[in-house]
Amino acid sequence: MIKVVKFGGSSLASAEQFAKVGKIIHADKERRYVVPSAPGKRNSKDTKVTDMLYACYDAVAEGRSYKKILDKIKERYNEIIDGLDLNLNLDHEFDKIEENFLAKAGRDYAASRGEYLNGIVMANYLGYTYIDSAEVICFDENGNFLADKTDEVLSERLKDLDNAVVPGFYGAKPDGSVKTFSRGGSDITGSIVAKAVHA
């Protein structure tokens, strides 16, 4: 049997939580495909990464100072990476994100980066293949989800992979621009992946 596992934001809020998730995945070799959310709150006073990304993007769009918010987001990921003792550096990814924010890539793009980055961390941690959801979850130019096309593309992409990490919550339109599902959309991604691999 093949199993797809999806982990929400609070399950992936810190290195300690990541380690727990790693144990859960490795406890059953049938858990082969992983759908992560963005890091959530570590405590009641904390801010979810997705909300920080929205705030950062809005600051850029309105011409306000955004560097402090961006640094806080970097800090969250670096804490997880350092806590897990990973040989991973996301500086290049953050440079690209900043560049795209300044180029007004849109709020959907901004919101999706939490899952995108967490997927990279998760794949590195587990030693699984990373698949960017923008390449396999398809929407039409009006932002409507294309179920059949997605199933075809994703099935093809996963068929020869024993394990993979596919970030939740987003996909892309034909022009490559990122489109998100509504908040909580990582659950939808989980079911899409499950269908594609006949889990």
Image: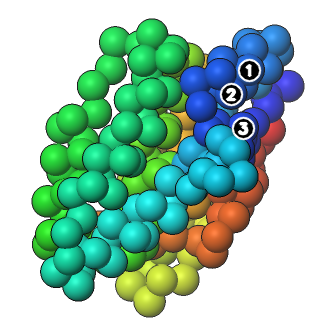
Label 1 is placed on what type of residue?
Lys
* 10 Å crowding of disc 1: few (<14), some (14-19), many (20+): few
Q: Eyeballing the image, is 125 above or below 147?
A: above
Query: Which numbered disc flags the more N-terminal residue, 1 or 3?
Result: 3
The label on residue 17 is: 2
Label 2 is placed on what type of residue?
Gln
Q: Which residue is mark 3?
A: 11
Q: Which residue is mark 1?
A: 20
Q: CA distance from mark 1 to mark 3?
A: 8 Å
Which image quadrant for residue 197? top right
* C-beta proximity under 8 Å, tags 3 and 2: yes
* 10 Å crowding of disc 2: few (<14), some (14-19), many (20+): some
Is 168 left, or right, of 196 in this rendering? left
Q: CA distance from mark 3 to mark 2?
A: 6 Å
Which image quadrant for residue 78? top left
Q: Could you say where residue 195 lies in the image, as x and y percent from the top left? A: 74, 50
- Which quadrant does the N terminus fall into? top right
Please report the residue visible at 56 percent of the width from the left and 17 percent of the height from the top. 126
Q: Could you say where residue 192 lies in the image, as x and y percent from the top left? A: 68, 55
* C-beta proximity under 8 Å, tags 2 and 1: yes
Please report the residue visible at 43 percent of the width from the left and 47 percent of the height from the top. 116
Is 14 left, or right, of 137 in this rendering? right
